[in-house]
Image: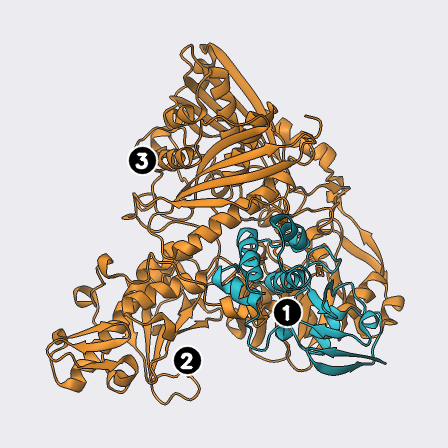
Chain colours: A cyan, B orange
Amino acid sequence: MISMKINGVSRQFHGDPDMPLLWYVRDELGLTGTKFGCGAALCGACTMHVDGEAVRSCVTAVSEADGSEVTTIEGLDAEGNHPVQRAWRAHNVPQCGYCQSGQIMSAAALLNENPDPSDEEIVDGMAGNICRCGTYQRIFAAVRTAAQEV
Amino acid sequence: MLGVQNISRRTFLKSAGVTGALVLGANVTTGSMIGTARGQSNGSSVKPNLFVEIADDGTVTITCSRSEMGQGVRTGIPMILADEMEADWQRVKIWQAPGDETKYDPAGKDAQNTDGSRSTRHHFDVMRELGAAGRYVLEQAAAKKWGVDASEVYAKDHRLYHTGTGQWFDFGEVVDAAADIAVPTGDAAPRLKDQSQWKYIGRDMPVVDNYDMSTGGATYGADISVPGMKIAVVARPPVYRGKAKSFDATEALKVQGVEQVIEIPALSDAMPAQFRALGGIAVIGTNTWSVMEGRDRLVIEWEDGPNVRHDSGTYNDELMASARAGGLVIRDRGNVDEALGSAAQVMEAEYFVPYFIHTPMEPPVALVDATQMPVKIVSSTQAPNETRQYVAEALGIEKTDVECQVTLLGGGFGRKSKPDFACEAAILSANIGAPVRVQWTREDEIRHGYYHAASAHTLKAGLVEEGNVTAWHHSGAWPSLISLWNPVQRTGHPLEFGLGLIDTPYNQVPNIRIENGETDAMIRVGWYRSVNNIQHAFAMNCFANELAEAAGRHPVEFLLELIGDADVMDLTADGVEGHWNYGDAIEDWPIMPKRLSNVLRVVAEKSGYGKSLPAGHGLGVACHRSFHSYVGCAVHVVVREDGSLHIPQVDMAIDCGRYVNPEGVRKQMEGAAIYGHSVAMHGQITTTQGAVDQSNFHDYTITRMDDAPLDVRVHIVEDYTHLRPCGVGEPGVPPYTPALVNAIYQATGKRIRRLPIGDQLESA
Ligand code: FES
Ligand code: FES
């Protein structure tokens, strides 16, 4: 049996330990804020935090998160008011919105590790997340804004 | 065109906890122009189109009947109605309409199909009428309550004021008195606000889904589950119109969570592909990962069929040969051969653009419950009524027995206009007797899509001594998207000619000939954001830049001379008949060279075109009309020693006529530059023995933040805002690539004539 805390709630998982966290969270727990984009760690749509670190949950087996604290977009802030989320709204970032859970989770982890990133560090830190609608200009600006607050 | 009816007594839009509500809808009397356009039968019944509800707590619920895929339609269209009604945006809610064109297509133009960048232009007038009707009814109701003449009452900011006393009611307070008030039509129809009174139209508005999209609360196609639902993935034939000969599911069925493996029969050869399910082997179970694992363990023998000869290596050469041969003359002005014969210099160049695939961030997904009537679909679709139609066909039932709920779309770009994936879910649901969600993986989306047509172009021009162009000849060849309906289609279709080719805007050139060569379609071809405009804008803007250089002329001045400043370019004067003008009347949305010249001048000025740049830097421009809008683009590029690029600045000028949400326009232009950057740098689908070679983002590259332009400056041109609204979602993409390619030439002296740019600069 595998146990973990997801957004502060203790969970036990009895299924195949190889199942990626993404599908456990989406299909078994019904937390659908985390998205599927590629299934191969290429797009970042599925980004979650495991013990505070950004991971691509589509390639992270449930077994790898055994005993960990997992945070999904739903758990980032109870009111949805994490500085990154507020900055996202202030810059009116989303177009279709589908990539944005992953973008926000990547940005939050980036700022957690490096509260004062340079422009290059923002670009490097966010380059793993694809936005097909092309909102990078606003994502970049929003990360800068959020950095002033965290 | 339509009357607005007060239908409060009906209960289509019941809000929880609200005791009374005023509901307004538009009447479409069957047999009217609108009904006829949809092919409906006779009869005098009245069909309500429900667009606004005012609850007695004052909440205004506005219907969005178009699909939101990032273009901001759930904000822009309701803004028009709210403005006209004098509603307070803070108290407006949006309700997403299901697919039902008899109710939710008030303009009667496109059956809720959200594509062609047409939502605003087809809904601007009707949303204003519906908003004005709402305001009218509320004003009348307030007058009734006060016992005064309605001329003494006016609506403002969600309140109804009495001019004499300054007394006011909140909108919600008059709902009880509003139910019986009829909305007059014709000359007595409620007056529209004067433009000077607009409070939302033309002002920046954040999108209504911002909060949900920043908290994981926004609902997309795969986010809705129903009791008893199964999840399926499908193994599809690698070659277009191939079939499964045999399969062995033994290993697949051993995967925990896999329950069944069943075949979706191949579509009969006699049936054109259209948006139908083409067949495959479906693995069905309880968890998306389980069925993906199960699919990997299937052993399938495929029969490839004739399209196995589709090999990019040879097909691309065939396309170029076909472009050289031309054949079908679609526009012929003056005498090109004579002008070329007498030219001082004849220039020729060939351009090639490969297949692309949409890659919306959300892969296709649909949930269908075919276990009961009506059949219920939940899908992130651009075309809910075509989804109903194709699902009905797949199940052998009537379209009226199928319902389609529309979620948010995680991007569409044309892919989600084509409901083959919903047909798969319907067939499986009917077969196993449970609701089924079919999930496409990224590999499925890239390998089994509807591809943007690859195309080859040969261009020829005659220059005289003074450096003027006297002849322009463009011949293009591509597999036609009409092949979806007519598999033996070998030429293009007026619908494709109209995408920036037949309307080549170089109106000052006295001799113009445009031709189309023949080719087979051996893959599903389908529209993609901006469609054929991408290759047409690329070829003609790059060739014009080559000509400017040959003539020793300033590229911007040269291009402005080719286009000219005529009010209107009349294609009928060149003998063109049946010009497809994005489905709209040419009188309403003419081709206006002066507007194209204008956006070019704006970007040239804003970008500082002509300023001296350091070595390795280049500034390029291009401009293009598409979806009735005019976009000029200037790209500043830095080409590094190793051939890699950096884009410090992009300027985009758009004249889209009347616009609703300028913030939305800016976002579309920013996104278009980045979409265009993917097209220019990376976009390429190839085939080997009929099968698509690419499979995921490692070999089908999409621009990321580290190669994206991050300083896109958008200039909305307002000189012509008296004109009708034009498209915004697509017109930004086509001019980006030629502007970049022209910039690269200035920086390096290297001409790119074949997309993608990829590593072509590494050897520069
Ligand atoms: S879905 Fe996990 S990185 Fe793309
Ligand atoms: S907002 Fe659509 S993919 Fe990023």
Q: Residues within 10 Å of mark 1 (few under 14, many from 20)?
A: many
Question: Which residue is label 1 attached to?
Answer: B222
Question: Which residue is label 3 attached to?
Answer: B568
Q: Left of B331 or right of it: where is B270?
A: right
Q: Are marks 1 and 2 on the same chain?
A: yes
Q: Upstream in the sequence, badge 1 or badge 3?
A: 1
Q: CA distance from mark 3 to mark 2?
A: 46 Å
The quarter holding residue B293 reads bottom right
Ligand 1: quadrant of the figure: bottom right
Residue A37 in the image: x percent, y percent?
67, 60
Q: Chain of mark 3?
A: B
From the image, which quarter does the N terminus of chain B lie in?
bottom left
Q: CA distance from mark 1 to mark 3?
A: 47 Å
Viewer-proximal residue among B7 and B673 = B673
Residue B52 in the image: x percent, y percent?
35, 74
The quarter holding residue B5 reads bottom left
Q: Left of B436 or right of it: where is B749?
A: left
Q: Are marks 3 and 2 on the same chain?
A: yes
- On screen, A39 above or below B503? below
Residue B628 in view here: no
Tell me the number on the disc at residue B13: 2
Residue A30 in the image: x percent, y percent?
67, 77
SS for tag 1? helix
